[in-house]
Amino acid sequence: MAVVLPQGALFRKSAEGSIRQALLEKDMVEAVIGLAPNLFYGTQLAGCVVILRRKKPEARKNKVLIIDASSLFRKGRAQNFLDQEHSDQIVDWYRAFEDVEDRAKVATLDEIKKEGWTLNISRYVLPPIGQDIPPLPEAVEAFKTALADARAAEDHLRKVLVEGGWLQ
């Protein structure tokens, strides 16, 4: 059975947390698929699909596949769309039931328990690091330059405030 929920249901406490914990302890949660925001009419919230199964195949017991499909969408004017190619990719990841870098993680129930029974996708699947990250020496040099510029701007502001009589 698949249930569509807002992503908040994956990590909120109270009644939702108790229900989530019970389903996990009974090993009924097979997969969680995080979707892009603004896919559903009437809400811009990101949704998720939780796949529940009473009797999991042996290889999937005591495990939950967590998929981050939040980048799989086609942007529309008023709403985003999940195209067939996106659905096919999600189904492929689900069928494979294995880790995929930056996309999917097979988490054990012990790992999930250590996380306080949260299924928050970002706890298990890290987003890809952008390609535009400069090498460390370049980043340090850019930081030093920006810091010097900020200090110069602060000195200039102080001078203007003193000249204007706003600061002594």
Image (spheres, grey):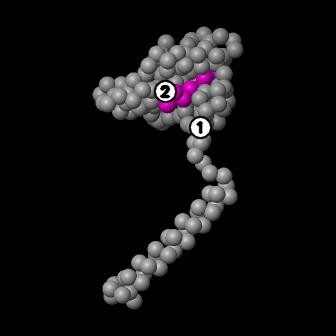
Q: Amino acid at mark 1?
A: Pro
Residue 43 visible somewhere in the drawing: no
In terms of sequence position, does the residue under pointer 1 or pointer 2 come before the other? 2
168 up-or-down from 99: above or below: below
Q: What is the magenta range?
A: 62-72
x, y percent for residue 41: 31, 25
> Dot 1 corresponds to which residue?
128
111 up-or-down from 166: above or below: above
User: Residue 23 or 167: which is nearer the viewer?
Assistant: 167
Which SS class for mark 1?
Answer: loop
User: Residue 73 or 119: which is nearer the viewer?
Assistant: 73
Q: Are marks 1 and 2 in contact (CB under 8 Å)?
A: no
Which SS class for mark 2?
Answer: loop
Q: Quadrant of residue 129?
A: top right
Q: Is residue 69 magenta?
A: yes
Q: Quadrant of the C terminus?
A: bottom left
142 up-or-down from 3: above or below: below
Q: Amino acid at mark 2?
A: Leu
x, y percent for residue 133: 60, 48
Residue 119 visible somewhere in the drawing: yes
Q: Residue at x 54, y 29 (%)?
A: 68
Q: Residue at x 54, y 20 (%)?
A: 90
The Cα atoms of the two marked residues, 1 and 2, are separated by 13 Å
> Dot 2 corresponds to which residue?
72
Is 141 left or right of 7, judged from the image as shown? right
Is 124 left or right of 16, judged from the image as shown? right
Q: Is residue 63 magenta?
A: yes
How crowded pointer 2 is (Cα within 10 Å; few <14, some 14-19, many 20+) is rated as some
x, y percent for residue 22: 54, 24
